[in-house]
Image (cartoon, rainbow, N blue to C red):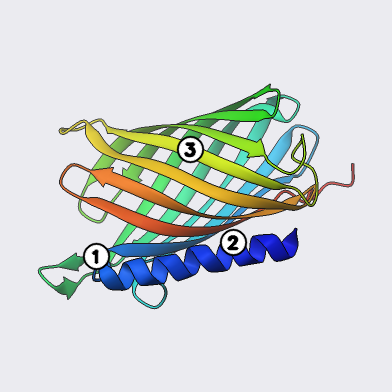
Amino acid sequence: MRKVFTKLAFTVLSLGSIAAYAQKNDLGAWYMYFGNNKISKKLNLHNEIQYRNFDAVGDLEQLLIRTGIGYDLTENNNNVLLGYGFILSQPYVNGEKKENIEHRIFQQFITKQKFGRFNLQHRYRLEERFLQDDFRMRFRYMIGLNIPITQKEMLPKSLYASVYNEMFLSFDSPVFDRNRVYGALGYVINKNMRIEAGYMNQIQENKNRGQIQIGFYNNIPFNKN
């Protein structure tokens, strides 16, 4: 299965490179690490790094680093979390690259449900965004679904499909900020690690852009139990 997933990931990246060339680099690439590690029976440490590019690699669009402490209201489910994010952005303005730094505080609630093979997750997130010359607030709602393909459960060495939709709503005008639709194939390496390769389309008020995404997920617990 690892060989199968490697071929799938290579295919996704190859198609992304071709599409990026054809669309004059309108297709970006995001490389992402997500850690969600138990530090006690109820507490977990969230940590993530996202390296986002305008093209396949080298032309930085955004570097995003998040961390936070979560608390399970029920075991492995219904988690509340308080976190902080550091975001370095390098957008193009009139053809010239600029640099912006944002500090972000966020609160979120995640709840999970299971229906047969379908593993459903809802995430509600409130963000307080401290930009260089501004302060903004934003609400995000994401619904995601993981479906094992080669086994009935999300077990080691199984291939799975992953999809999500996330809507961003601003407290300012205009209220609609953006919407993201994502689809991917993933591989469960072991009970604490998995990897995904997929495509995300992001719709904003005046633009629509695609991203190839490679994500690694690490749930290795830090506590002994």
Q: Residue furthest bottom?
A: 58
* Residue found 75% across the figure and 48% down from its top: 158
Q: Secondary structure at mark 1?
A: loop
Give percent across and percent down for residue 212. 43, 59
Mark earlier in primary sequence (3, 2): 2
From the viewer's perspective, tell me whether residue 100 is left or right of residue 65: left
Above or below, 217 against 120 in this view is: below
Q: CA distance from mark 1 to mark 3?
A: 26 Å
User: Where is residue 189, by image quadrant?
Assistant: bottom right
Above or below, 76 against 18 in this view is: above
Above or below, 221 against 2 in this view is: above
User: Where is residue 7, by image quadrant?
Assistant: bottom right
**Mark number for residue 91?**
1
Q: Nearer the viewer, mark 3 or mark 2?
A: 2
Give percent across and percent down for residue 99. 26, 68
Q: Residues within 10 Å of mark 3 (few under 14, many from 20)?
A: some
Give percent across and percent down for residue 124. 47, 29
**Mark number for residue 8?**
2
* Residue found 16% across the figure and 33% down from its top: 174
